[in-house]
Amino acid sequence: MVYLKKSAFRARRLRDLVVAVVIAVVIAALPLFVSDVYVQNILVLTLMYAALSQSWNILGGYCGQISLGHALYFGLGAYTTALLFSKLGVLPWFGMAAGGIIAALIALALGYPCFRLRGHYFAIATIVIAEIGYLLFLNWDFAGAATGIDIPIRRDSWLTFQFTRSKLPYIYFALVLACITWLVTFLLENSKWGYWWRAVKDNPEAAESLGVVVFHSKMAAAAVSAFFTAVGGSFYAQFVSYIDPDSVMSFRFSLLMALPAVLGGIGTLWGPALGAAILIPLTELTRSYIGGTGRGIDLIVYGTLVVVVALARPEGMLGLFTRRRAPEARA
């Protein structure tokens, strides 16, 4: 019986890897047949939010710490890269790494007081802290304050990570980022940390009685989640070439990171990707085609569809394709 369980577990893990490789190959080939710039832009945003939502899912889904302030880490990554490149000429790749490290360290510093809160108190605290960060950058003259930062345009190059003639490099980088966050989640899901996080999510007291260091588990999840969120922010800054507090630190970014995971299937491996594949194109299409009336019809349609999906499939859209199973315990 134990051998059969192990075999089924390994087969499922292998199947997930094969499916991931096939999907990545299909997405990589898609831009070669789709030349429409608008569609390519949607693809970039979908892949980026798939990575961001997967990053959020590590803390909010697996560890059960619902954060509504991840826009802070997204903005930190964007501002770190933009400031280092525009003020000191530091290449975006180094700014990306620096932004991720800074965000992880700040997540650890904020986690020390915030993880002593539980439930809705923790969620409210994350919103407040993110808004404080937004206001600080809104009034910080060195970072451009409300005016923001125009990222200097150089010739197209992977070195400066700038491409004005084609979106293909951005598509492929966003795909790589989405694949990396998925792979990290895949590896963590059935590691010691993954089991600890799910135990903390289900019952912190019981987990602690079994030897799980609850506080350290939450801190580790927060650091990993913040790091990849900041990398996504760095990528976004290079993609749009201009940032200000509203464009990278507003509350809507926190929602757009959490919603794909919630709609796709929170605390699952494929939920964030599925949610992003549905939610982000829906957001962009409703905004583009019925958002110009000025009456908010696009938001009404978009919001209604989100509510319908949430009510019809509260466990997430992933439930339409497979029966949700808890990860197997180690034998």
Image (tube, grey):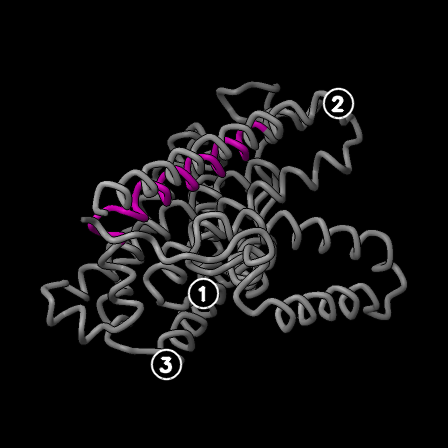
Find residue 289 and report its horizontal and vertical position in percent. 86, 53
In the image, taking residue 86 as reference, residue 183 lies left or right, namely left
Calculate the distance from the C-alpha at mark 1 to the C-alpha at mark 3: 13 Å
Question: Could you tell me what secondary structure mostly forms the magenta stretch?
Answer: helix
Q: Nearer the viewer, mark 1 or mark 3?
A: 3
- Position of 56 relative to 172 (above/below): below
Q: Is residue 270 magenta?
A: no
- Position of 284 relative to 114 (above/below): above
Residues rendered magenta in the picture: 172-194
What SS does tag 3 mark? helix
Residue displayed at 64% across by 23% down: 29
Image mark for residue 33: 2
- The residue identified by callout 3 is 121
Calculate the distance from the C-alpha at mark 2 to the C-alpha at mark 3: 48 Å
Three-letter code for the amino acid on which mark 1 is drawn: Gly
Give the residue at the far right of this rendering.
293
- The residue identified by callout 1 is 69
Comes first in the chain, label 1 or label 3: 1
What SS does tag 2 mark? loop
Give the residue at the far front of this rendering.
1
Q: Nearer the viewer, mark 2 or mark 3?
A: 2
Classify mark 3: residues with Cα within 10 Å, few (<14), some (14-19) or many (20+): few
Find residue 303 and report its horizontal and vertical position in percent. 71, 69
